[in-house]
Image (spheres, rainbow, N blue to C red):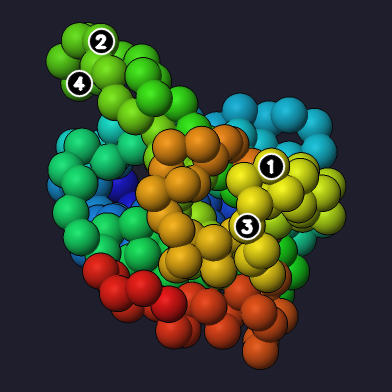
Amino acid sequence: MSLNSVHYEICGKTFSRLQLLMFAGVHGIHRTLQPSERIILEVTDIGEGAVLDIFSPKIAALQVVIYPSQRLVRNHLLINFKQKSGAAFNWVQKQTQYTQNKNYERLEANATREDDFRYTNIFTGKECICPLIGYLVWMKFGYVMTVTEREFFESFLKQNKKNSQSILNLINADEKLWQEKGYSWNGFFNLKPGSESYTILKEYRPGVRN
């Protein structure tokens, strides 16, 4: 079956299976999106958009919400079975490239902290436990805090006697503090060329502080 033979209607717009997988950045995790990769895509209509739940031998869980009318994609969750250096970066890079080429304006993300997250491996049926560490990662890839989150962050800085211009600045100066006391936050990636988000992503090097 061709990746373009299955279509979904979302907010009056038609998307192929291939397009939805690329909006979710799956081509940054799998080198090919062919059926041989055993990628499962579940699409749930929510009126103003659609929830994409994706599973594969490499992806324990990936949940993305696409809002075509708002030209917005929101990343809720990503868990890889095999964690390796650069995997998350490749995913973000491919997703930003594709959504920007489709004239989308913004990506959003839940930068979650959950130390003992539980999920079920749909291939084995076994319950698994792993930490969600998005709160430590998303800022490194160009995601910046919303205005509301920034207000909470300012309070955090005062309580811990820190003076940082951004969460990325804090991570580079004292990652241990944020690792121990940090919390979940909402962020966004500005897809406009030349934005702060693109500057951070361009300068990112796996294993090297910005």
Horizontal side, residue 2 vs residue 159: left or right:
left
Q: Position of residue 60 (x, y in %)?
A: 29, 32
Distance in Å between CA atoms under marks 2 and 1: 38 Å
Q: Residue at position x 25%, y 69% from top? A: 207
Circle 1 sits on which residue? Answer: 159
Nearest-to-viewer mark from 3 and 2: 3
Foreground of the two, 78 or 169: 169
Compared to residue 25, the image places residue 114 above or below, namely: above
Count residues near mark 2 (Cα–Cα under 10 Å), then give few for <14, some for 14-19, many for 20+. few
Residue 127: assigned label: 2
Look at label 3 and name its amino acid: Lys
Q: Residue tagged by mark 3?
A: 162
SS at badge 4:
loop
114 w.r.t. 154: above or below: above
Measure the C-alpha gap from mark 4 to mark 3.
45 Å
- Name the amino acid, label 2: Glu
Give the residue type that dot 4 points to. Answer: Phe
Quarter of the image with the C terminus is bottom left
User: What is the x, y in percent for residue 56?
Assistant: 26, 37
Q: Which three-letter amino acid code belongs to the residue tagged 1?
A: Gln
User: What residue did someone put label 4 on?
Assistant: 123
Residue mark closest to the camera, 2 vs 4: 2
Question: Residue 121's image quarter?
Answer: top left
Name the N-terminal-most of marks 4 and 3: 4
Q: Nearer the viewer, residue 109 or 74?
A: 109
- Looking at the image, tell me whether mark 1 or mark 4 is earlier in sequence order: 4
